[in-house]
Image: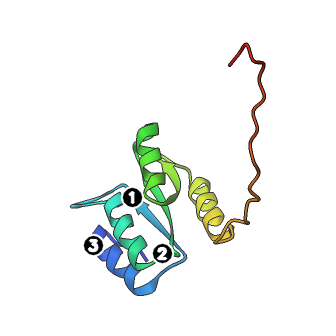
Amino acid sequence: MAFDNGRAGLDAIREMAPDVALVDRRLGETDGLEMIRQAREASPMTRFVMVSACSETRDIVTAVRHGVYDYVTKPFELHEIKSALNRALNEPAEPPPISRQKLVILCPKQAA
């Protein structure tokens, strides 16, 4: 399903709780990141792939911090979107546990 504004897309995510949602950074009157923030509250298991004309590192990092699973910049090839969506669908919901190890740093007394 496709929606031409963030409000309608958010309502659909709340209702359907999809596995993956493809979201544009700019959604008319609604910011895509704000819509994702609200959608994550309603559907925490949904993964979000964002598309945007902005390829600045700062914007990509901001999107990831807001819970975006993958970020595809415009203009894009269809295979890029397909790959991002497939990764989002096929990766396990929970990463395997990481064994915690202690970090020990050894250095000569002179360097300290």
Q: Is residue 102 visible to the viewer in this orientation of the structure?
A: yes
Q: Is residue 95 above or below residue 9?
A: above
Relative depth, front residue between 65 and 79:
65
Badge 1 marks a residue whose secondary structure is strand
> In front: 7, or 60?
60
Say what amino acid the circle numbered 2 marks. Answer: Pro
Q: Bin the neighbour count of mark 3 within 10 Å (Cα to Cα): few under 14, some 14-19, many 20 and up.
A: some
Q: What whole-number distance in Å separates the C-alpha atoms at marks 1 and 2?
A: 19 Å
How did the renderer colour the structure? rainbow
In which quadrant is the C terminus drawn?
Answer: top right
Outermost residue, bottom direction? 15
Residue at position x 51%, y 51% in the image: 72
Residue at image mark 3: 7
In the rendered image, the vertical position of residue 7 relative to residue 99, given as above or below: below
Q: Quadrant of residue 15?
A: bottom left
Type of amino acid under label 1:
Asp
Picture residue at 64% right of the left edge, 65% below the top: 86
Quote the CA–CA distance across marks 3 and 1. 13 Å
Where residue 11 sits in the image (x, y, percent)?
32, 80
Q: Which residue is mark 1?
A: 24
Q: Are marks 3 and 1 in contact (CB under 8 Å)?
A: no
Element carrying mark 3: helix
The residue where tag 2 is placed is 44
The image shows residue 35 at horizontal and vertical percentages of: 33, 66
In the rendered structure, the answer to whether residue 11 lies left or right of residue 19 reads left
Q: Position of residue 50 (x, y in %)?
A: 46, 57
Question: Is residue 5 at all visible to an observer of this figure?
Answer: no
| Precedes in sequence: disc 3 or disc 2 | 3
State how far apart marks 3 and 2 are (Cα).
Answer: 18 Å
Residue 22 % position (x, y): 47, 65
Of circles 3 and 2, the one toward us is: 2
Badge 1: how crowded within 10 Å, few (<14), some, or many (20+)?
A: many
